[in-house]
């Protein structure tokens, strides 16, 4: 995700936090547009509104720490936060950038675990990123239209053809279906599973 993309993501998170605060104070009618959509999705997730708010705060704090450290780090490294677990993916320019991303992630309040899947890779180009985005998009579509999978409980990151799944599954059968969908996609090299089964 580009630096500008992260900026817009932060704006979206702020809108989501406002939505959560509105629900907590009983001001649900004030929810409009994207903020209302964010709150609606959060309420259907297994972690609920409070878990969603906590994870959003963690993500916002890590983004802030990364921003203070390096725009290049923000451009190259992605994160997913679920129940205080932080999954880091992306392509760091060098080993120091990879270490900085992990070190700063641990500084955020509420972090329970940091999973470091950042690759040191300065050779991948635009086509590699486009391919990874296409894999994630195809998988999100398959999970969404599979009635036996609660797709809103899954996060998907793809780096160099490696698909990282994180989130919560209702059952081992549901998780197996999600992993099978990922493995069946063209150009997928490997599926790394960090999904917890309830």
Image (cartoon, grey):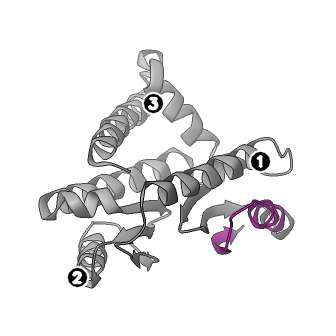
Residue 159, placed above or below residue 63? below
Residue 72, position as x, y percentages in the image: 22, 61
Residue 96, position as x, y percentages in the image: 22, 82
Assign a secondary structure to mark 3: helix
Task: Please check the rendered image and state whether residue 24 is part of the magenta-colored stretch, yes or no.
Answer: no
Which residue: 38% across, 71% down? 123
Which residue: 42% across, 56% down? 55
Q: Nearer the viewer, mark 2 or mark 3?
A: 2
| Upstream in sequence: badge 2 or badge 1 | 2
Badge 2 local density, few (<14 within 10 Å), some, or many (20+)?
few
For mark 3, what is the residue? Answer: 23
Magenta residues span 176-196
Which residue: 14% across, 65% down? 69
For mark 2, what is the residue? Answer: 96
| Upstream in sequence: badge 2 or badge 3 | 3
For mark 1, what is the residue? Answer: 142
Assign a secondary structure to mark 1: helix
Residue 98, placed above or below residue 151? below
């Amino acid at each position: 995700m580009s630096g500008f993309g992260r900026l817009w993501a932060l704006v979206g998170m702020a809108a989501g936090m406002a939505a959560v605060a509105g629900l907590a104070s009983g001001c649900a009618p004030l929810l409009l547009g994207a903020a209302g959509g964010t709150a609606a999705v959060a309420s259907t997730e297994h972690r609920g509104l409070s878990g969603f708010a906590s994870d959003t705060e963690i993500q916002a704090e890590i983004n802030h720490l990364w921003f203070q450290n390096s725009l290049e780090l923000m451009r190259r490294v992605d994160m997913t936060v679920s129940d205080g677990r932080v999954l880091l993916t992306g392509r760091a320019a060098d080993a120091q950038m990879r270490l900085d991303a992990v070190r700063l992630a641990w500084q955020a309040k509420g972090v329970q675990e940091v999973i470091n899947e950042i690759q040191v890779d300065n050779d991948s180009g635009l086509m590699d990123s486009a391919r990874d985005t296409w894999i994630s998009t195809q998988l999100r579509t398959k999970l969404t239209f599979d009635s036996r999978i609660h797709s809103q409980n899954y996060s998907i990151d793809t780096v160099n053809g490696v698909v990282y799944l994180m989130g919560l599954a209702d059952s081992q059968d549901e998780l197996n279906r999600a992993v099978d969908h990922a493995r069946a996609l063209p150009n997928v090299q490997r599926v790394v599973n960090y999904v917890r089964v309830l």
